[in-house]
Amino acid sequence: MDKATLRSTVFEILKKTPQTHFHAIENDVRRALETYERHDVLLLQEVLWDLLIQGLLAPGKNSLNLNLPFVHVTEYGAQCVEEGQTLAHDPDGYVRQLAASVDAPIDEVVLQSVRGALSVFLTGSYAGAVILLARAAECLFDRLADAVVGHADADAPGRDEVEATPRSSRRRGEAVVHAVRHCTLPAPLRESVDPHLNGLLALIQLSRHMDGSPRWPDATRDQVQGFVLLFPEQCAVVYRLVNALVP
């Protein structure tokens, strides 16, 4: 049994029973998974403690049962479960889904940066998560910049600025967005440029000053979770743009 399978099963159980007990969860898991064996209880305990640390669960079921092993889904946990945001609490599952959603091999720096961002997000380091997501965004912008410089018309607006600005900088990212706006692209892809590229650019703006020097971002859990949930489609758009720009 692996943690990803147990985690997704626990989420389904918590949707139906938000006030419960560790032993009741185990009974429900045993009924739901034919492959569940007795020794898997230790792995299940790890999953439940992860959810406690991450703030999706809290001790207590009601006023008469305030302590562990009784637990309840927190307001934040209910939001995650109801809005389908639980994938942010499964770094390996998130990365697998990210890779499957993009029609091209994803740069390893992007994958590892995203995995690291989710890992620190789950420990409560929201600034650290932004910095690692921004690193992934910088890698995507560098790839897109190479496509713009290598294949844009010589007089295309913004091309010279892309070439003249340092890699992995805010200014370069802004120049890339400007240049891509003026490229010949299929209509659906052209319409996705501003919302998706500006979303990635926001990560870089939070983590770097205009001159490219690092800054410590001020970020909340909800803000970072929003970045995490939007990133897969943003990533897919970048690779679609690269494919469109490269003959």
Image: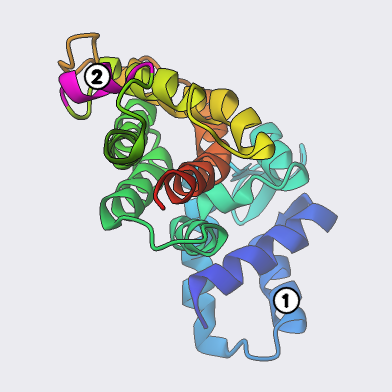
Q: In this orientation, which residue lies closer to the viewer: 2 or 187? A: 187
Residue 207 appears anywhere in the view: yes
Q: The residue tagged with tag 1: helix, strand or loop?
A: helix
Classify 222 as above or below 14.
Answer: above
Q: Is residue 103 above or below residue 156?
A: below
Residue 222, can we see it?
A: no
Relative placement, left or right, of 45 versus 179 is right
Q: Position of residue 85 (x, y in %)?
A: 64, 45
First in sequence: mark 2 or mark 1?
Answer: 1
User: In this image, 1 relative to 210: left or right?
Assistant: right
Q: Which residue is mark 2?
A: 160
Is there a contact, CB below 8 Å, between mark 2 and mark 1?
no
Q: Quadrant of residue 35?
A: bottom right
What's the residue at 27%, 15% (across, down)? 171
Left or right relative to 141: residue 72: right
The image shows a total of numbered marks equal to 2
Q: Which residue is mark 1?
A: 27
Residue sitting nearer the eye, 136 or 105? 105
The local crowd at label 1, few if under 14, some if 14 to 19, many if 20 or more residues have their Cα within 10 Å, is: few
Labelled disc at residue 193:
none
Color theme of the render: rainbow
Report the span colored magenta.
157-166
Answer whether residue 200 is magenta in the image: no
> In percent of the image, x 28 and y 34: which residue is there?
149
The CA distance from mark 2 to mark 1 is 63 Å
Q: Amino acid at mark 2?
A: Asp
Q: Is residue 37 above or below residue 161?
A: below
